[in-house]
Amino acid sequence: MKISTRILIIISFSLILLGGMLAWFFNQAIDKETNMFFSKYEKSLYEQKQAQLKDATKIAIAVMDKIYQDNIAKGATKEKITQEIKEKLSKAFYFEDNSGFIFITTEKAIMVFHPKLKFLEGKNLASSKDKNGVLFSQEMVKQAKKGGGFTNYLFAKKKGGEPKPKIAYTQEFKPYKWTVGTSVFVDNIEDEITILKKESEEGVRKELIFVLSASAISIILIILISTFLIKKYM
């Protein structure tokens, strides 16, 4: 085999290897950056939901406390104060689709107020648990007594439906030792992340194809130039 042919083979092999390595490193770097971005973005979305839940609950507590103080000063009964609180909170919906609402239970997890599921009022929910065994009503009471906190659990959006991830924030209304809170489904966050990941993967795939194509063209040009120079000068 001629020396010129050997040189050409070595150059060609080296360029192909280099191109493959660059493409691999490019793909690895993109994957790493993408995963870091989505991890931070998902965390940010959850934190936004948590902040909304916490703010809504604190506002509700403030409203309830105002009603309580005003009525206690007038010598009103607990029954009257409770009724006024219910009437006020029954109109307190938030989020763009009005899905957010305030609920109240006793320290024994007996439902005092629920604006959408009235049939639950008066029922003991202490034994309520999700498919993972989380006694979420008890956990909400526990978080409230700690000064306020979040509870993660699974709950069906409709009767007989598949349980979806949900998060609640609860805080104690000290005059009656009630647990006051609100909750929201967070499966939409997971759906949004999944869609964005698919779009990102498609974008990365196109970028990788472009890089590989550009590398292949460059390698072919270099090989042709090298062949020309070797034939001319050797």
Image: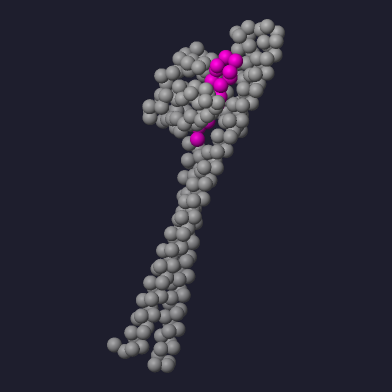
**73 or 16: which is nearer to us?**
73
- Residue plotted at (48% across, 65% down): 210
Quarter of the C terminus within the rendering: bottom left
Q: Is residue 120 visible?
A: no
Quarter of the N terminus within the rendering: bottom left
Q: Vertically, is 25 above or below 109?
A: below
Query: What's the coloring here?
Result: one colour
Q: Is residue 179 visible?
A: yes
- Residue plotted at (33% across, 84% down): 6
Q: Vertically, is 115 above or below 150?
A: above
**152 or 222: which is nearer to us?**
152
Quarter of the figure with residue 91: top right
In the image, is 55 to the left or to the right of 118? right
Residue sticking out furthest to the left: 1
**Residue 13: percent from left, percent from top:** 36, 76
- Residue plotted at (43% across, 63% down): 25
Q: Could you tell me what secondary structure mostly forms the magenta stretch?
A: strand
**Residue 77: percent from left, percent from top:** 63, 6
Quarter of the figure with residue 233: bottom left
**Residue 189: percent from left, percent from top:** 51, 39
Q: Magenta includes 192?
A: no
**Magenta residues, start to end:** 170-186
- Residue plotted at (55% across, 16% down): 177
Residue sticking out furthest to the front: 146
**Residue 216: percent from left, percent from top:** 43, 72
Q: Vertically, is 233 above or below 57?
A: below
Q: Vertically, is 167 above or below 88?
A: below
Q: Total of numbered circles in the picture?
A: 0
